[in-house]
């Protein structure tokens, strides 16, 4: 994904979100998001690019700066639902030049007391003979390698639960029916079944039942033995 058009100027100052310190610890009221936020070796004369992380409910925007060195970083945010909305481009003095939106980006959940991987982003800011350009060259899911580097860089966060924005399913309420979902546990993908019962127009959850089966079992056998009327 890239954008190389000249961007019209804004009048304000961009406030980048500061990376957390190595001594930072999450709690029940906070969370961190992390990834690789890199720029290339292009001559930019101090021009910069930052990703726009937008909270769905409050519309608060966090600006995650892309850098050319030590590009794996994390910022502290409030738990909630988010999307990567696009990027903002700035001059040397952090005056925004403009911004671009990423089309059709989906929401993902950031849980408290945890770390969520956003992706590996490669952006650029460069100056040509007649124009100045900013853009994003690529977005990759490199969860394992970037997470290993994140754990080494932030030892206090090495043992917190980790999630990936890439693995999350849409967070809208489920309609009645059966759904197959996947999640990653210790670098291995696991598949599970979610059954949402039909209560007419009342979608309140009265009870949640989690059932784990043995090695040679299946969901079908579990339904028969437990007498679930699905």
Image (cartoon, rainbow, N blue to C red):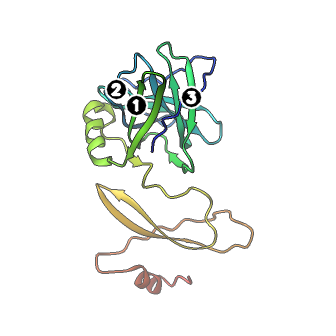
Measured as percent of width and height from the top left, residue 30 is found at: 49, 34
Disc on res. 7: 3
Q: Earlier in the sequence, mark 2 or mark 3?
A: 3
Measured as percent of width and height from the top left, residue 202 is found at: 73, 67
On the picture, is 192 further left or further right than 171? left
Q: Residue furthest top?
A: 93
Q: Nearer the viewer, residue 127 or 54?
A: 127
Whether residues under marks 1 and 2 lie with C-beta atoms below 8 angstroms apart, the answer is yes
When the figure is inspected, residue 28 is found, relative to residue 46, above or below; the finding is: below
SS class, disc 2: loop
Q: Earlier in the sequence, mark 1 or mark 2?
A: 2
Q: Residue at x 40, y 16 (%)?
A: 45
Quarter of the figure with the C terminus: bottom right
Q: Of the residues tagged 1 and 3, which is closer to the observer?
A: 3
Q: Nearer the viewer, residue 28 or 42?
A: 42
Q: Residue furthest front?
A: 129
Which residue position holds label 1? 124
Q: Residue at x 44, y 39 (%)?
A: 113
Which residue position holds label 2? 42
On the picture, is 108 further left or further right than 117? right
């Amino acid at each position: 994904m890239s954008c190389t058009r000249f961007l019209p100027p804004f009048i304000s100052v961009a406030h980048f979100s500061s990376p957390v310190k190595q001594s930072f610890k999450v709690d029940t009221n906070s969370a961190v998001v992390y990834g690789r936020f890199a720029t290339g070796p292009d001559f930019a004369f101090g021009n910069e690019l930052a990703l726009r992380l937008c909270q769905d409910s409050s519309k608060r925007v966090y600006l995650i700066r892309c850098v050319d060195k030590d590009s794996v970083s994390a910022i502290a945010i409030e738990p909630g639902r988010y999307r990567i909305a696009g990027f903002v481009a700035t001059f040397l003095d952090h005056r925004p030049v403009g911004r671009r939106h990423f089309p059709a980006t989906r929401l993902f959940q950031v849980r408290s007391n945890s770390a969520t991987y956003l992706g590996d982003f490669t952006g650029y800011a460069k100056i040509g003979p007649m124009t100045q350009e900013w853009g994003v060259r690529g977005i990759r899911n490199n969860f394992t390698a970037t997470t290993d580097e994140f754990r080494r860089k932030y030892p206090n966060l090495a043992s917190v639960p980790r999630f990936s924005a890439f693995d999350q399913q849409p967070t809208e309420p489920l309609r009645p029916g059966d759904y197959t979902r996947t999640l990653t546990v210790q670098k291995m993908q696991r598949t599970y079944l979610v059954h949402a019962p039909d209560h007419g127009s009342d979608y309140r959850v009265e009870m949640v039942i989690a059932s784990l089966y043995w090695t040679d079992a299946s969901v079908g056998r579990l339904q028969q033995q437990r007498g679930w009327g699905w």
